[in-house]
Image (spheres, coloured by chain):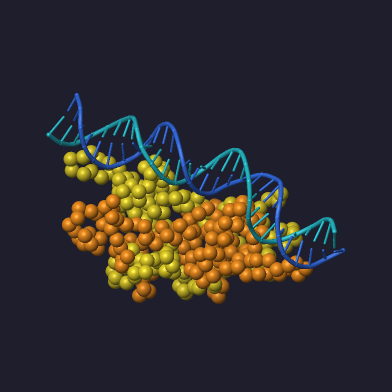
Chain colours: A yellow, B orange, C blue, D cyan
Amino acid sequence: MDAWTEVLEDTGMDPRLDRDTSNCSIARTLEIVGEKWTILILREVWYGSSRFGDFERVLGCPRNLLAARLRMLVEEGILATETYKEPGSRSRPKYVITPKGVDLVPAVMGLLQWGDRYRADPEGPAVLTRHRECGAHVDVEIRCERGHPVQAEDIESVPGPAFRMRSPE
Amino acid sequence: MDAWTEVLEDTGMDPRLDRDTSNCSIARTLEIVGEKWTILILREVWYGSSRFGDFERVLGCPRNLLAARLRMLVEEGILATETYKEPGSRSRPKYVITPKGVDLVPAVMGLLQWGDRYRADPEGPAVLTRHRECGAHVDVEIRCERGHPVQAEDIESVPGPAFRMRSPE
DNA sequence: CGCTTGGGTTTATTTTTAGATACTCAGCCT
DNA sequence: AGGCTGAGTATCTAAAAATAAACCCAAGCG
């Protein structure tokens, strides 16, 4: 009996298949960053863009969607607005990443790394990531709290404190 | 002058804003896993589901979309079909993850980790991930090739071998 | 004052996605 | 032969999201 099946033994329900998935952290993250353009906006912030016009120019995304996505990212605390002032122009807003946004970097790097491995051009990736201090290539890896590198196969998923079964019917 | 601006100095184009983003590894990964349901299907595979009916029951996703997503994941080599045979029933297909699919785990764990941190229920996450061998909590972190832990701020993104400017239309 | 610029909003159209049935099909079981 | 089951297909409608293009607005400039 594994960590799932010991949760509820006598109901005829299967904890894997009849659990409540509405509080899944993956799904909740995707509710925010899973819409089209959102992660690409963050990519551009990460590569150095900050102005509305920058995003529009490099992404080629419709202005109304861009405005909606930026508003949402600010509401969620992933980006924050500051102002910049070009000499001879009035102050305008710009978008900068917050610590909550920085915490999305591992997820985005995971996507980047997979694309670099499986979907890059024959000559290699379009962008490289390196450690500013030593210049070495940077990537994302799975480790346990004790610092051991962990293979994906050695990860065990078990019900957590907010685990719930779906209400029957 | 940084690693971007030294690419093209005299064209009046800005390498950050006028680069060709069509070969971005992040965007290419999102083309595959960015559709609704796809990552959630992978989550269930990761949690132990493998049959069409399992996915349908736990995700509550329309059958036609589920079939389309599974077909695409198999075509892309992220899942593979095998057969299973319940005693007294005929052989039926099931879906198992491939090495290419396993390589998506860091990206998905990145999403999980962010959701656990910022969007979990007050009592905690619904699912915990731990290292099978030592039981310690598992998460995803950024390191450079030399093994140094890297803060997101210390990542430098530079043009790679497939870097291209957008053709001036 | 009228023009320009950057950063949006509004509105209309097209495309995707969701959701709900209903149908098929192959093999095991009686 | 006829019924049951799991794994799909096919079809349709409704809702949501994406796109496209026109419009607005505030400040600075000549």
Is residue B68 among the parts visible in the rendering?
yes
User: Residue at left 76%, top 70%?
Assistant: B87
In the image, what residue occupies the spot 56% across and 73% down? B132
Going by the image, does B34 lie left or right of B92?
left
Q: Residue A167, position in %: x, y?
A: 68, 50
Which quarter of the figure has residue D29? top left
Q: Residue B120 location in percent, x, y? A: 52, 54
In terms of depth relative to the viewer, which is nearer, B26 or B142? B26
Q: Quadrant of residue A24?
A: bottom right
User: Which residue appears at 61% of the width and 66% of the height?
Assistant: B95
Tell me: residue C19, above or below residue A153.
above
Residue A138: where, in percent of width, then height?
36, 68
Name the residue rendered at 36%, 64% in the picture.
Answer: B151
- Compared to residue A83, the image places residue C25 above or below, namely below
Count of numbered tags:
0
Q: Is residue A152 visible?
A: no
Percent x, y of residue A99: 38, 55
Q: Foreground residue, C3 or A160? A: C3
Give the quadrant of the N terminus of chain A. bottom right
